[in-house]
Image: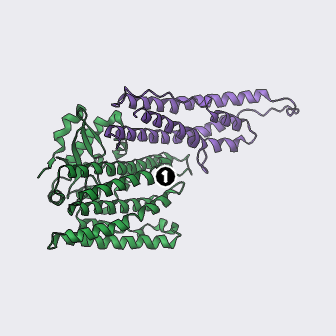
Amino acid sequence: MQSLEAMSLQRSLIDWRDDWLIECAFVLSRETKILLMDLSTIPINPNPIKWIIKDNEKTKSITITVNDWLKILQNRIINRAWEDLNLIILKSPFKSRIQPESAPEIIKLPIYNEILNAALNESWQKKLPQILWSSSSPSYFIETMWNIEMNRACSSILKGLE
Amino acid sequence: MNFSFEIPHNFLTQVASNQIQRFGSILKDTTTGKIVAHLQETGATQNIVSKLGGDILLNPFAIPLKAIEIGSNITANYQIHRLDKKIEQTLELLKGLQTAQYANIALAGLGLGVSVAMFAYTKKRMDKQDMRLSNIQSSINLLVDQQRRIELERLETDLQAQLDLAEEAWLHADGGQRAWTRVADKLNDMVYKYPKHITKELEIQIIEDESLLLYLLERYRVLAATRIECLVLTGELQAAFNFSKKFSEQNEIILSNISPLKFTSRDNSSAPKFQKNLQKGRALSSRIQDFKDTSLTRNVLISDFIDNKTDGREYIKQLKQEKSRELVLVSF
């Protein structure tokens, strides 16, 4: 049987994961709307031969908007969640055996390209909510990025106890 | 007698100075690693339920949801296991044991230690309208499979019969030995029928109405707790330990993927009540984790019974006679 301290730490990690999961869900449900609104203000290029000339200005604007939005998300939930996690490690009886965890950076993960490509797509109003947050389907962002990264961090910590 | 019942405030100083830590229902010395006490409910535990607003709330899994509904600060207690808040919250929990304050009974009702509820009381509780399948109107409509429904209703009736026999056994000439053995055997056949129903319920992507799930969990919990109690009463401590261990291992499997978002509908995520729904999902997932933890730490208590050659019947008899304290700490 695992030691009681290890079981206790495991429970703390489960609590950490679940606390930040609902925080992420709450933030995404609101911030996705804001991103959609911001993207809708980017003007469509009236140039009639835009199918010949790539609309670099629009692409640039969209990329900047998405990057700025992701930066907010990174700071608001991801970095804070990992700070919280490292505090749990610091206060645990295993602090000398566990390395602090580094927060994942969204722009370095595969999902960044998926978000950006969705934003650049003509059907961005449909594709972006499918990735980030919609009322009709699970959040791809939460399922594939958030959950995976959180579970990875928890596994890595518990592995350090072996 | 090789066990004693301690008063929680005896441990407060040691908890405050981190000499003692808690996990589940166990208090442990941080220096020696020795278990110093187990949280154990008594015959007066039902007083906690009545203090929560009479007979209205009978399913302990639903306690945090009720608290959210009425705006109680018990919602903060779903973080009782976080290490950075552990000392403070363990202190609150132990102080709360003396007064059974509503806000501090985060673990109550989940069956701390070995169940010592009067069989008659358990039967009365499970027979209440709220705790019966027929009362879960919306979920009944979802039970398309008639076979499932018939099985669950039969299990309800069978449990009532077993609890009747278990209570009557106290008066039997042989001290209840044969009757409790029979009850334990029968409950063993019944308890393993619930995991498949629970698993089926958890296959639903978003559980908007958790009433059927909570019904199943509470029935499952009571069956297992009653079986363990019967085994302890008949002195079959090794059997009680083996069963308790299997039960907690099974819980780890069937309840492994509980997430707060499972209970939160994404519809109306722009509405103000969405945040409240998230809190509700969080509280429910935490409650289920608490149930897993208390199941796990019960194994350690029974293991201590075996090591200390505890007379199971005497242990339960003494706890039943405890009428003024709803929860005590047990040490050997």
Q: Please give the letter of the chain rendered in green.
A: B
Disc 1 packing (10 Å; few <14; some 14–19; many ≥20):
many
Quadrant (top left/top right/bottom left/bottom right) for the C terminus of chain A: top left
- Viewer can see residue B69: no
Residue at (48% x, 34% y) in the render = A153
Instruction: Please give left or right for residue B190 compared with residue A61 in the image.
Output: left
Q: Quadrant of residue B224?
A: bottom left
Quadrant (top left/top right/bottom left/bottom right) for the N terminus of chain A: top left
| Pointer 1 residue | B263
Residue at (40% x, 63% y) in the render = B192
Q: Position of residue B49 (x, y in %)?
A: 28, 57
Q: Position of residue A142 (x, y in %)?
A: 56, 41
Q: Position of residue A60 (x, y in %)?
A: 73, 27
Q: Chain of mark 1?
A: B
Instruction: Please give left or right for residue B315 compared with residue B110 in the image.
Output: left
* Residue that sits furthest to the left in the current view: B1
Residue at (41% x, 62% y) in the render = B216
The front one of B80 and B158 is B158
Give chain A's shade. Answer: purple
Q: Quadrant of residue B17?
A: top left
In the image, residue B60 sits, relative to residue A101, either above or below, namely below
In the image, residue B278 sits, relative to residue B46, either above or below, namely above
The front one of A129 and B119 is B119
Q: Quadrant of residue B46?
A: bottom left
Q: Position of residue B289 (x, y in %)?
A: 39, 48
